Amino acid sequence: MEIDEAREVRTTCPYCGVGCGVLAKVAADGQVSVRGDPDHPANFGRLCSKGSALAETIDLDGRLLHPEIHSRRAGWDEALDLVASTFSQTIAEHGPDAVAFYVSGQLLTEDYYVANKLMKGFVGSANIDTNSRLCMASSVAGHRRAFGSDTVPGTYEDLELADLIVLVGSNLAWCHPVLYQRIAAAREKRPEMKIVLVDPRRTMTSDIADMHLAIAPDGDVALFTGLLAYLGLHNAIDRAYITTHTTGFGQALFAASALDLAGVATVTGLSEDELGRFYSLFAATAKTVTVYSQGVNQSSSGTDKVNAIINCHLATGRIGKPGAGPFSVTGQPNAMGGREVGGMANMLAAHMEIENPEHRDRVQRFWNAPDVAQKPGLKAVEMFQALADGRIKALWIMATNPVDSMPDADAVEAAIKACPFVVVSDVLAQTDTVRHAHVRLPAAAWGEKDGTVTNSERRISRQRTFLELPGEARPDWQIVVEVGRRMGFGGAFSYETPAEVFAEHAALSGFENDGARDFDIGAYAGVNEGDYNALEPFQWPAPSPATPLWPAGHLPLKGGDRLLLQPSPTANVAKRGQSVNLPISPLEGKMAGRPEGGAQAGGWPEGGGTTGRQPTRFFANCDFYTPDRKARFIAIRPTVEIRTSPDYPLILNTGRIRDHWHTMTRTGKSPRLSQHIAEPFVEIHPADALRFGIGDADIVRVSNPRGDVLVRALVTARQRQGSLFAPMHWTDQFSARGRLDTLAAPLTDPISGQPALKHVAARIEKFVAKVFGFAVMRQRPEPDTAAYWAVAKCKGGWRVELAFADDDIDWAGFAGSLFGAPPGAEMSAYHDRDAGQHRIAAFDGDRLLGALFVAPN
């Protein structure tokens, strides 16, 4: 297609679940620029550091541009025929459950939809799961237990309307910066707003918190069951709401009362005074929003944590109202879209249940499918365990890097290497996962893809194309469709455009939906190419005019206190408003260059962040999606898990940093983002550092029975004593031994299947090196002879930090190899052998190839 260089293209950021609108423009010389979309209701022009650096990440360096079979370049027909025939043969010989898809929240909804349809409807297996299992599966499970559906009740506007925001296991400042900015702006307008942070670490988010509860790892269930008991004891509950609109309160309150305040203090590691102040604040504040993220979800008790939070909101009737409710903030740009299409092993499409025979029949009839999967498939951790023991014999991985992101990562890598047939569709030619693929399929990247994504507040937005497809890259949906056709399902996979896929997805959501299912975008079932291309961001539900918008007697609350009395298919479609140039907050000057500061300085509209748009809240009239239309309290007893031991006395908490994303396949291309934090690190409390003989910036080994990593020590009182924190981003592509999830056990929540990545027993010790150094160079280095190395993009080239266990090294030879110096390159060196210092530069003519500096300290 031809790209119009004269206009900006409205698209959506490919990073977190905030779903920020982006304006992208390609100049006549091919240079791309991006800025925040002032009319997008998720961000109103703001972008975080990652979003503002998107233009630095779209070069073709390292791209997979052609199909490959066993590392040999192949044509598309040969590659697709091999994939289709191998999957078909495997199914014929071993059954449909011998194959699997592992997909990603980076996929667009249209990609997700066709992959799920192929596996569940035509292969006949539910063995399709997603890396979103690692970030929000416990929230899905908690919603379904409480509400009867995976429904996110609230909207971003609630963050501005709340009088109390409780942030639980969520470092918004670094992981969802634009939402953090939104809260900061609201706080400036209403200084009486209170913010409580519940997190073992004192993160940057604590800077705006009135109270920081440095909770013990996995103390959240005790904290919120204790809160429920407190609310009951002090009669701070809404008895009329509980009686009329809920079930199970008595059992939940009885279970929550198992611990008294002193017992809760013991389990949470908080003082009784801290608990009392938090509990009384929550009890006294009607407009309370509880925002939670990975610190809640990534736990072996994640689902119980979610329901413990929801229980407190149900007990006080604080749900479905402006400025009140539990709010799950998703980690990926389309984790919500994946939930909508059923891209998880235990779900059907359009929020239908795989265990429900009526739902299976409905989907089978709609798809005209031969054999819809009859039972849930393997969840992510189970899937790779099945790969290891030989039950899965063919695996297709799409847009994700499980060799680095899955728990017990070394075992996952071994399982992938042992699998008879592995297909990977990706944008990069080399990741730790791609290198093990038998077939590599070049996929379209951000800027080349065309489709939709759904953000954390149920808002569907378009990702649009503004770049030509490079080489032979293809969109993921198109690759899946071609395989489906070659497997003999051409009639069901006749799509020619993503608009056709979206229209079918929308039609299925409204099919035989009388308002009994929450997800309904049937208004868009007849969307044509022109309408699809012009689609504005909208929140669901958006049913067809013939379908009730809500269950009988259920009216949605729209903005403020206004009720929309009649269903309308267009009521939720965002109209463009005028941007208002207001300062975000008095912190703006201080925030410049800070973790929370975005590159754009656009402000938030006055009077909340809607400017005429009407955000939709669920459960305003208290009807839920359970059989009796009542919300369910879940009885939860707090438990204490002790995973430490004398050999492994510390708890490792894994997470993200401000400027990197997942396994760095995109952010690692940006010099600006890579220089924020250029090396893998571990945070350790000063008392623990003293105990283990570790100094600030020492290289340390963090280990447990599954493996070890080498990282820099960051000694900081922000870290809770007895715990460690390390980011999960570094891979074998960027460091010698930085693959953090090697250490994580494949321990999962028994309901959601989400792994416990925040509670890993480990020990720490100083790594003794004889020589340290760094180098800068033009080409990407491969310093395999160094015991420790970490490489980062810098302006004009690369920088690598080095440490060596041995000092008997031919430094000139090492430098030449490191720089990729050609034969005959001029080497200029300075050696002080007595001091152990060496400085070496390599030139190709007048062109500096690189410079190396090494010394004993």
Image (spheres, rainbow, N blue to C red):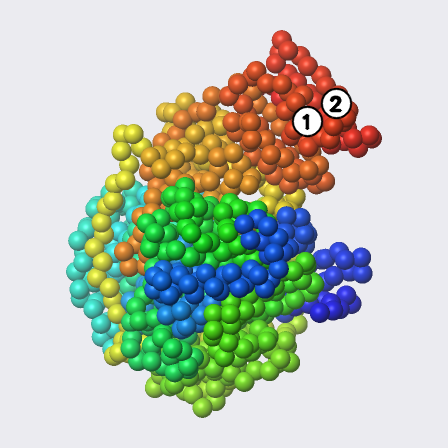
- Residue at 57% from the left image edge and 48% from the top image edge: 71
- In the rendered image, which quarter contains the C terminus? top right
Question: Helix or strand or loop: what does disc 1 sit on?
Answer: helix
Q: Mark 1 is on which residue type?
A: Gly
Q: Earlier in the sequence, mark 2 or mark 1?
A: 1
Q: Nearer the viewer, residue 53 or 112?
A: 112
* Dot label at residue 816: 1
313 w.r.t. 715: above or below: below
Categorize mark 1 by other alpha carbons within 10 Å: few (<14), some (14-19), many (20+).
many
- Residue at 50% from the left image edge and 58% from the top image edge: 398
Mark 2 = which residue? 827
Categorize mark 2 by other alpha carbons within 10 Å: few (<14), some (14-19), many (20+).
some
Residue contact at pointers 2 and 1, CB within 8 angstroms: yes
Q: Mark 2 is on which residue type?
A: Met
- Outermost residue on the right side: it is 846
- Residue at 33% from the left image edge and 78% from the top image edge: 359
Q: Is residue 840 left or right of residue 595?
A: right
x and y, in percent, of residue 214 in the image: 37, 44
Quarter of the image for residue 694 reads top left
x and y, in percent, of residue 358 in the image: 30, 80
Question: Helix or strand or loop: what does disc 2 sit on?
Answer: strand
Q: Nearer the viewer, residue 369 or 10?
A: 369
